[in-house]
Image (cartoon, rainbow, N blue to C red):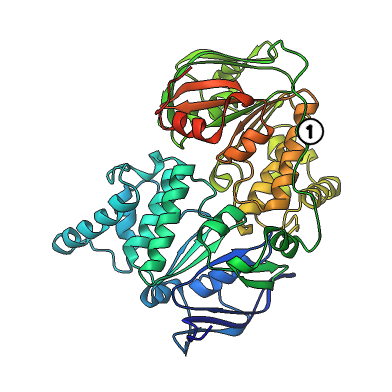
Amino acid sequence: MSAAPRFSLQNINKRFGEVNANSNVNLDIYPNEVIALLGENGAGKSTLMKLLYGFYTPDAGEIVVEGEPLVAHSPKQSLRLGIGMLFQQFNLVPALSVLENLLLAFPAAPWWQWRRRRLTTDVLACLQRIAPDIDPQRLVRDLSVGEQQVVELAKIMALNAQLVILDEPTAVLTPQEVERLYQFVAQCRADGKVVVFITHKLADVRACATRIVVMRQGRIVGDWRTETVTDNELIQAMVGKDTGLIVNRIAPPKHLLPKLMVKRLNVSSRVGTITAMDFEVSPGEVLGIAGVMGNGQRALAMVLAGILVPDSGEVILDGVSINALAHETIKVPDNVAYIPESPLTNAVVAQLDLATNLQLRALDALPFLQWGMPALHEAQHKLAAHDVRPSDPHLSAGALSGGNLQKLVIARELSRPVQLVIACYPTMGLDLIATRNVYERLFAQAEQGACIIWFSEELDDLLRYAHRIMVLHGGRVQSIGPVASFDRQRIGRLMTGHAQAC
C-alpha cells in the first residue's frame, strides 16, 4: 500500500482471565478499502475491533489514528474520531421508538425542540435511505430481529462514521436486505469511508471485500487482496487444517403418518400474526421455513414451543395438545427442544454462569440435586463437545460472543433426545465448522425420529438439507412442498408476496 494507513493497531494484546484473545496483532487499515475479517468463533475478530472502537482497553500495544496514538480511548472518543461499530448484540432501548433510538446514538442527546427538529430531519433521511418500510414511530420491542439490525445500520449512517465496523451484519438479514447491505458497503467506499466487515460467510467476502484478513487463535494468519486468494485457501487458514464442510443429507422419513399436526392456527399478538395455518410433519422430517423477518416466524415458533397461547387452532405432538400445556404452564415441554432467535435475550440469563445456564431446564425439579461436581463435569463435557469458547463453566453467559452464546443454547437443547426441535436461525453468527457441527446435531435428532422445524435465512442450506420447505408471508403459508419444487428465485418471490401462493 502506497498511502499511509488511516488506522493502525500495533502489537495489540488482550487477555480475559486465562484466555488470550489477541496476541501481538498488527493491522493497518487504509483509506477506501473494505476489509473482510474472517475467522472461527473465538478467533479474536470482534475483540480486536472492540479494542479499536474503545469498548475494551488493550493490555499492551498501541492504536494510532491518522498518525496520532490514542490515549484513554473510549467509544465516546471513537464517535468524535468517526469510528462507528455495529455489534452482534443490539444496542437499542426496547421501550423507545425507532426515531428515539437513532437520536440517542448521538453523544449529546438533542432534547431541545429547536435542535431536535433539525437533527430529526437528517436522521429520518438516513432511515428512509436504508429502511424505507420501517415506521420511525414504532417501538423497537415490536420490531423483528432483522428490522432491529437495520435500525442499527441506520445509526451508523446517521453518525457519518468514517470507519464503519460491521460485526456479522448479515447473520439475521433476508436475501433482499443482504443485497441492500452490500449496496450500503459499496456506497461507503465510494464516499471515501473505510469498512471492516467481520463475517464467516465467504459470499459476503466475495461480494464486498477488497482485502481479506484471517485470524486464528487470536493472531492474524493471512492477509490478501481479495482477487489473489481462493476459498479453499481461506478455509484452511481459518481452521488450520483440511476439513469437510458439507453434511450428509439425511434420508426422507419412512413413516408418512404425522407426528406433529398444526390445525387452523390463528395468532394475533405483539410478537406477530398467524392466519389460518395448517401443516403436518412426519417423524424424522426436516421442514425448512423461509420468510422475510417479521412474517409470523417468531409467533409460530413460540406457539410450537408452548410458550404462546394461540387465539384459535391447535398444535398436537404425539397426540398431546401443546396448546393445553401452554394454558397450564407457559413453558417449553420436556420433549421439545427450542432454539430461539436472539439467544442473549430469549434463551440465557446473562448474569448466570455457563453451568447454571446449561441446567435451566431442570430448575423446577429439585434444583438442589442438580448442582455439585457431577453437574460441573457434565457442563464441562457439553461445553467442550460443542466448542463453546471460553469453555469455563464458571464464566457468565454475558461474557460470550454471539456465536458462542448460540453454541451454549444448542449444547443445552440438543444434548438429549427429543420429539420436536424448533430451531430458529440456529447457525446465526457461527463460523463454517460450527455451522457444520450444528447441522450434524440437528439432523441426528431427525434420524432418531424427531420432527425438525428449521427457520433459516440460509436459502442455499434449506435447499440442500430440508425435506420440505414452507414459505411464509404476512403470517400465512404462501407455499409448502418438497424441496425439489423450489429454487432461490421462487423462494424469493414467495417471501415477498410476488408469487402465487399454493
Residue 159 sits in which quadrant?
bottom left
Residue at 40% of width from left, 58% of height from top? 184
Is residue 156 toward the left or the right of residue 380 in the image? left
Label 1 residue SS: helix
Q: Position of residue 387 (x, y in %)?
A: 76, 53
Task: Say what amino acid the circle numbered 1 marks.
Answer: Ala
Residue that extends furthest to the front in the rendered view of this protein: 227
Q: Dividing the picture into quarters, in which one does residue 251 lie?
A: top right
Residue located at (29% from left, 56% from top): 126
Q: Nearer the viewer, residue 132 or 48?
A: 132
Q: Is residue 79 above or below residue 427?
A: below
- Residues 364 and 74: in front is 74
What residue does disc 1 label?
444
Is 427 or 188 nearer to us in this picture? 188
Q: Position of residue 344 (x, y in %)?
A: 57, 48
Residue 306 appears anywhere in the view: no
Q: Is residue 97 visible?
A: yes
Relative to residue 215, is residue 469 drawn left or right?
Answer: left
Determine whether 142 is above or below 36 in the image: above
Q: Position of residue 414 (x, y in %)?
A: 74, 37
Q: Is residue 223 left or right of residue 388?
A: left
